[in-house]
């Protein structure tokens, strides 16, 4: 009976993560499309998109932590919420200086949020599928962050398309995790139906 409850809880959590990852992938894809179209034409739109991106990440982590056992057991996500919230303000300030400052701020954030995502995925490894993609995503985010900081020091001014590439890779990893969980849940349901 206890095993059954544990299995149902794990399955319910994976259902939530599947929806969450699909939602994050969809948001990132829409953000990239907006960044590469209207964001290239209007500084005001680009600025709004650059502020929205870390703000969305903060909100998404709040919801995920709350749905995945609460804030007490999801410390890496609580820290990620703080880092993303601070970065939302930092990007707003950096936009008044230059895009080099914005890219540098995104670089710091990509390193911290990537490492925190990596920590969350490692913690979830035993209970949820698709975490290998989240581990890769977190590690790659940290590497991209270091590259952003390096690029921010170059004389040429970067554009929103640099961040769009980063967001596109993130969308890919969220989509892979969502599909992986979908397949795993379908297989499990088929096995359950056969029993």
Image (cartoon, rainbow, N blue to C red):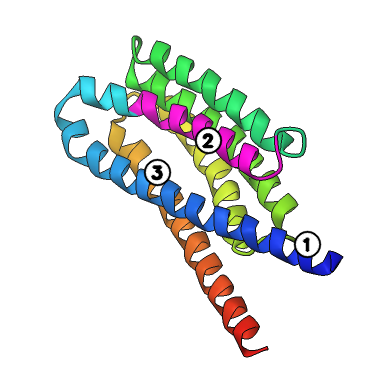
**In the rendered image, which residue does mark 1 sit on?**
6
First of labels 3, 2 by sequence position = 2
Q: Quadrant of residue 5?
A: bottom right
- The reply, left or right, for residue 116 in relation to residue 23 is right
First of labels 2, 1 by sequence position = 1
Range drawn in magenta: 50-70
Residue at the spot 70% in from the left edge and 37% down from the top edge: 70
The answer for how far apart the CA atoms under marks 3 and 1 are is 35 Å
Q: Tell me if label 3 and label 1 are in contact, CB under 8 Å.
A: no
Q: Which type of secondary structure does the marked residue at label 3 adopt?
A: helix
Q: Tell me if label 2 and label 1 are in contact, CB under 8 Å.
A: no
Please tell me whether residue 168 belongs to the stretch shown in magenta: no
Residue at the spot 73% in from the left edge and 34% down from the top edge: 75
The answer for how far apart the CA atoms under marks 3 and 2 are is 10 Å
Q: Is residue 172 visible?
A: yes
**Nearer mark to the viewer, of 3 and 1:** 1
**In the rendered image, which residue does mark 2 sit on?**
110
- The reply, left or right, for residue 72 in relation to residue 26 is right
């Amino acid at each position: 009976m206890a095993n059954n409850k544990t299995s149902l809880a794990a399955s319910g959590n994976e259902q939530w993560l599947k929806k969450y990852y699909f939602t994050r992938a969809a948001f990132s894809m829409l953000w990239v499309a907006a960044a590469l179209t209207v964001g290239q034409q209007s500084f005001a739109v680009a600025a709004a998109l650059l502020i929205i991106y870390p703000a969305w990440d903060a909100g998404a982590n709040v919801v995920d932590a709350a749905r995945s056992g609460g804030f007490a057991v999801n410390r890496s996500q609580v820290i990620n919420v703080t880092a993303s919230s601070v970065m939302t303000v930092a990007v707003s300030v950096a936009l008044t200086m230059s895009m080099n400052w914005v890219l540098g701020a995104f670089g710091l954030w990509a390193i911290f949020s990537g490492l925190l995502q990596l920590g969350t995925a490692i913690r979830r490894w035993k209970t949820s599928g698709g975490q290998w993609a989240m581990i890769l995503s977190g590690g790659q985010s940290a590497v991209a962050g270091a590259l952003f900081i390096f690029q921010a020091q170059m004389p040429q001014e970067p554009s929103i398309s640099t961040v769009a590439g980063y967001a596109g890779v993130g969308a890919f990893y969220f989509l892979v995790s969502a599909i992986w969980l979908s397949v795993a849940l379908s297989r499990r349901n088929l096995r359950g139906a056969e029993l």
